[in-house]
């Protein structure tokens, strides 16, 4: 069953020019999944990471939807609106399976799968365990190999193992709004903090205990062996790979992309300057341009 309704990114009653995303709802074995589905043409699926939502991509969607069908799931990573079933497998491989199940349910083929942050790890796992519907893989600044998570986010793993601690870590960002744009929070991930997005994410995290339960399950299930295995499989999978990377990022360093690209025949790296982890927020036009150009390629690029 599909249900359409609207989501828009807003602050205290102000849309601030953000594009409106028309959200739909899909029933899967794991629960109800909300997703945006805009445009027509070759399919691009955009995957977000932990403690943000589909709205992370809201500036890129309209730039791509003129030429592509753009699908953006609101994954159970802590800022989604509808919790999954209590017994859903929300380990990273479980969420990767959720992504693949969505592709099956929507009958999407030859997909350009694009992942950022934790969503990049999920995309690598999905592309190498359920590759049938995936034609190309784009990774923006994200977890790679043993860096799952990178050093800057190791505290999340420990917090998830103790009941209530992850929520406690988020309380200061809820109470002190300026804290959200510092390096202690989202400021580490974007050069130009978007207050409307940050407000939405914090509100969503605290809106439902089921949402917080879901993200704790995801974080507790993180194991670097998952991304190491995915990288090793990518080396022989024959899936064209593009790394769209902000070299200024202090959390997901450019060396991550360089190591992975060296393992995957024909892999490309394109740099996004003047940006941090969230390239789609800091540099949406450049990010959309690179994703769109790669999605149009019908064959993997030849190595230099």
Image (cartoon, rainbow, N blue to C red):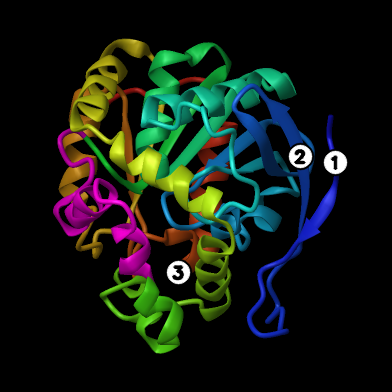
* Closest to the observer, 59 or 169: 169
Q: Are marks 2 and 3 in contact (CB under 8 Å)?
A: no
Against 46, is 57 above or below?
Answer: below
Q: Position of residue 140 (x, y in %)?
A: 38, 47
Q: Position of residue 148 (x, y in %)?
A: 22, 40
Tell me the tag on residue 127: none
Against 216, is 298 above or below?
Answer: above
Circle 3 sits on which residue? 282
Of labels 1 and 3, earlier in sequence is: 1
Q: Residue at the location (71% across, 84% down)?
A: 14
Q: Is residue 13 left or right of residue 301?
A: right
Q: Which residues are magenta?
A: 145-170
Report the Cα–Cα distance between label 1 and label 2. Answer: 5 Å
Tell me the tag on residue 3: 1
Report the Cα–Cα distance between label 2 and label 3. Answer: 29 Å
> Is residue 139 something one can see in this rendering?
no
In the picture, the quarter occupied by the N terminus is top right
Of labels 2 and 3, earlier in sequence is: 2
Circle 2 sits on which residue? 25
> Main SS type for the magenta part?
helix
- Numbered disc total: 3
200 in the magenta segment: no
């Amino acid at each position: 069953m599909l249900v359409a309704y609207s989501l828009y990114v807003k602050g205290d009653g102000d849309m601030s020019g953000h594009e409106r995303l028309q959200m739909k709802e899909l029933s899967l074995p794991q629960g109800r999944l909300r997703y945006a589905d805009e445009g027509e043409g070759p399919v691009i699926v955009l995957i977000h990471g932990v403690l943000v939502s589909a709205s992370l991509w809201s500036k890129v969607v309209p730039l791509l939807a003129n030429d592509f069908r753009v699908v953006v799931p609101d994954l159970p990573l802590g800022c989604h609106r509808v919790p999954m079933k209590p017994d859903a497998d929300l380990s990273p491989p479980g969420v990767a399976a959720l992504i693949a199940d969505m592709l099956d349910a929507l009958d999407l083929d030859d997909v350009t799968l694009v992942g950022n942050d934790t969503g990049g790890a999920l995309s690598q796992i999905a592309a190498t365990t359920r590759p049938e519907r995936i034609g190309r893989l784009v990774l923006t600044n994200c977890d790679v190999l043993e860096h799952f998570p990178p050093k800057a986010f190791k505290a999340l793993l420990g917090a998830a193992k103790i009941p209530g601690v992850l929520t406690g870590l988020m309380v200061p960002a809820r109470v002190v709004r300026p804290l959200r744009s510092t390096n202690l929070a989202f400021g580490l991930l974007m050069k130009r903090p978007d207050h409307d997005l940050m407000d939405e994410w914090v509100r969503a995290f605290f809106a439902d205990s089921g949402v917080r339960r879901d993200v704790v399950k995801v974080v507790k299930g993180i194991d670097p062996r998952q991304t190491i295995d995915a990288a090793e499989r990518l080396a022989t999978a024959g899936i064209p790979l593009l790394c769209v990377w902000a070299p200024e990022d202090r959390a997901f360093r450019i060396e991550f992309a360089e190591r992975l690209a060296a393992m995957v025949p024909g892999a490309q790296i394109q740099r996004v300057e003047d940006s941090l982890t969230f390239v789609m927020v800091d540099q949406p036009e450049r990010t959309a341009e690179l994703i769109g150009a790669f999605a149009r390629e019908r064959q993997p690029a030849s190595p230099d």
